[in-house]
Image (cartoon, rainbow, N blue to C red):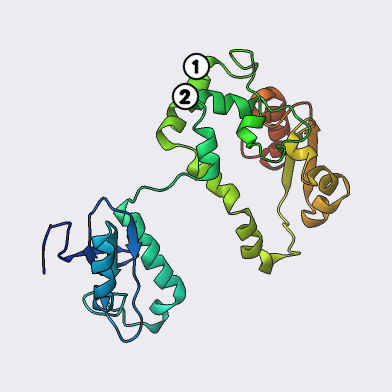
Amino acid sequence: MESVDAGGEVRHWSAEVNGISLHVAEQGPAAGPAVLLLHGFPELWLSWRHQMAALAARGFRALAPDLRGYGDSSAPTDPAAYTILHLVGDAVALLDHLRLPKEPGRAEKAFARYDVATVLKKFYSIELDNVTAPPGVEIIDFLEASSSSPLPWMTDEELGQYVEKFQKSGFTGPLNYYRMMDMNWRLTAPWHGAKITVPAKFIAGEKDTSFESFGTKRYVESGGFKSNVPALEVAIIEGHHYLQQEQAEGVNTEILSFLDKFSENCVSR
């Protein structure tokens, strides 16, 4: 059955993923769009043989693993190793193992219309009261880049360091945090109403769009934040969103004044 022919024969290989060895049968061109086929009970990868051939003939890369516990894949002895989370984890890990090219998201496509330095300057220059773009307009098109170079609180050399790293990594990872915001609410639902009891300090710029928007300012000023974090100290100072850079000395003073309350006997000043 072994073959490197991208046309018809099935190739077999194994991948160490998610803590197990997963046997995979593959058919079709390696450069073709991947289609992952997952069998049921009591089956094997072989159950998809007819579909694999049809997909391969159309230029797709058909991938049919033996699921954990089946065929030539690892079979953990503990029943707890067969939850739906394990199954999904195996599938995701397999796709990650293949390093498949990913279709850029809507935001990434919009960002790509600009060079990285312009994208960064557009965000670093935000001084709007509302960052909601009009209907049909992408946020990156709505924002304006600072006309001054360098930025008032960042040198061109410093900006270049950011540009170098984002040119290498792209923006997908950072954007994914925002894509998971609704999921985070669901994941943290069991702790709804729980209090954070350790001392904490919240520092924000009075002109920070994120503070002014999304109900954040109301949450802080109404006492809601203090209710959830009883040992909270709040400092609203002059500045915008990237406060630790724009008002570096002011933020340093706020942080140190807070830490001094707890570290007088630990740190020499």
Q: Name the residue under label 1.
A: 157
Q: In which quarter of the image is the C terminus?
A: top right
Instruction: State which quadrant residue 213 falls in.
Output: top right
> Which residue is at 17% across, 56% downward?
6
Determine the image quadrant of residue 169.
Answer: top left
Q: How crowded is mark 1: few (under 14 residues within 10 Å), some or many (20 or more)?
A: few
| Amino acid under disc 2 | Gln
Q: Which mark is residue 139?
A: none
112 left or right, relative to 193: left
Quadrant of image for the N terminus: bottom left
Q: Which of 83 and 66 is in front in this view?
A: 66
Using the image, determine if residue 191 lies above or below residue 164.
below
Image coordinates of residue 24 in percent, x first then y, are: 24, 67
Q: How far apart are marks 2 and 1 (CA)?
A: 7 Å
Q: Helix, strand or loop at disc 2?
A: helix
- In the image, residue 104 sits, relative to residue 249, either above or below, namely below
Looking at the picture, tell me which residue is in the foreground, 240 or 237: 240
Describe the element under mark 1 as helix, strand or loop: helix
Residue 74 image point, x, y percent: 26, 75
Residue 110 locus on image (x, y percent): 54, 36
Instruction: Check residue 161 in the rendering and tell me which mark sits there, or answer none.
Output: 2
Tell me: 58 left or right of 243: left
In this rendering, the count of numbered labels is 2
In the rendered structure, are the residues bearing label 2 and label 1 in contact, judged by CB atoms less than 8 Å apart? yes
